[in-house]
Structure formats: C-alpha cells, structure tokens
Image (cartoon, rainbow, N blue to C red):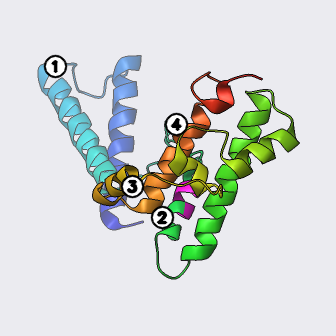
Amino acid sequence: MTLARRLFLLVGVVATAAGFAVVAGVSLGLELTDIFLGLVAALAALQGLRYVQRRRETPMNTTVTGDPETRVAVPIPGSDFDDDLVSAMGRHTHWAARKRVVDRLEARAKQALVARDGRAPEEAAALLDTGGWTDDPVAARFLGASVSIPLRQRVRLFLSGQSSLTDRAGRTVAAIERIGTGDGPAGERR
C-alpha cells in the first residue's frame, strides 16, 4: 500500500469513527454545527471524486452480440444453369457447356411434355426428335430437331445483337413454359 493510500484510509477511518461517536451522543468537544457538517461533506465529496477518478482509469469491457437479423445465404434456384449458359459463351469450355445446356433443356422439355401435357415418355422423346413439341422452329432446332429456320427469322436472330446461344436458349425456355397451356402443337391433344 502506498503512503497516500494509507493516509486516505486513516482519515476515512477517523472520520467514520468520529461520525459514529457524534451520532451515538459521545461528546468529543465538538458540537454538531454547520462547520462539522461542512467538513464531513467535503470529505465525502473528495472520496467520491477519488472513486470517480479510479473508475475513469479502468478499461471498459464490452460484449459483442451476434446480429439477429443476418441473412443466410442460400443458392438461387437456376443459378447453376445461368453459370452453364455464361460458360457456354466462353471460348475454352464452349462445347461441353453448350451440351450441358442443351441436355438440361431437353430433359426439362421431356418432363414438361410428360407432366403437363400427359404424354408418354416415348411419345415425348419422339416429339422432341421431330420438333413437333413446339411451333417455334428455333427452339425445336436448338434441342436437335432437323427443322429449317426461315430466312426471315435467321436475319432477325442475326440482327438482334444478342448472343445466338442465349437467344435460342431463351426461346427454348419460353417454348417449354408454353407446354400444356394449349398454345401450340404440343398443347393440342390427340
């Protein structure tokens, strides 16, 4: 303990003992006057300031809580298809990625013909091979049917400014969405 601390402790103990003595009625030659109360008040104020100073010098400990409203990152449905489509437009993985895109769209078209149009799987495969599943020759040809595309549509595809792969894939997706709605050859029942 330092000397200043011992001195403060001694003054505090003497002041406390004197306060108890005055309250108990022991007369130490001091009367309960305004001067005595002023000294006690000054001593209490000094002690309070000392504790405030000590508290200001201590480091503050804080707790970091987790954010209850953080969003959980989940994969976006179809983002892998978008990645394949972008990859198919690249130069290095062009053919393998294009094959994945075509295979995936062909599988979805077959599923749509079976589920929404009520076709048998063999009949759906035959419709995909002949191009009879849609009235859009671009979509039919994209999935492998030997359908000729009129010159007017070829020129429009060329002048559209889009990548031919993305335009054809977009038209194929739109044709698959129309399956079973009655809009086109596959929607017409036998």
* Pointers 4 and 1 in contact (C-beta within 8 Å): no
Q: Which residue is mark 1?
A: 33
Identify the element where label 3 is drawn.
Answer: helix
Taking depth in this image into account, of 179 and 131 the one nearest to the observer is 131
Comes first in the chain, label 4 or label 1: 1
Q: Which residues are magenta?
A: 80-84
Mark 3 vs mark 4: in front: 3
Tell me residue 74's x, y (percent): 59, 46
Rendered residue at 58%/67% (across/down): 98
Q: Amino acid at mark 4?
A: Pro
Look at the image and tell me whether residue 179 can be seen. no
Identify the element where label 1 is drawn.
Answer: loop
How far apart are labels 2 and 4 at the CA level?
36 Å
Q: Which residue is mark 2?
A: 86
Comes first in the chain, label 2 or label 4: 4
Rendered residue at 47%/61% (across/down): 165
Q: Amino acid at mark 3?
A: Leu
* Pointers 3 and 4 in contact (C-beta within 8 Å): no
Rendered residue at 85%/41% (across/down): 121
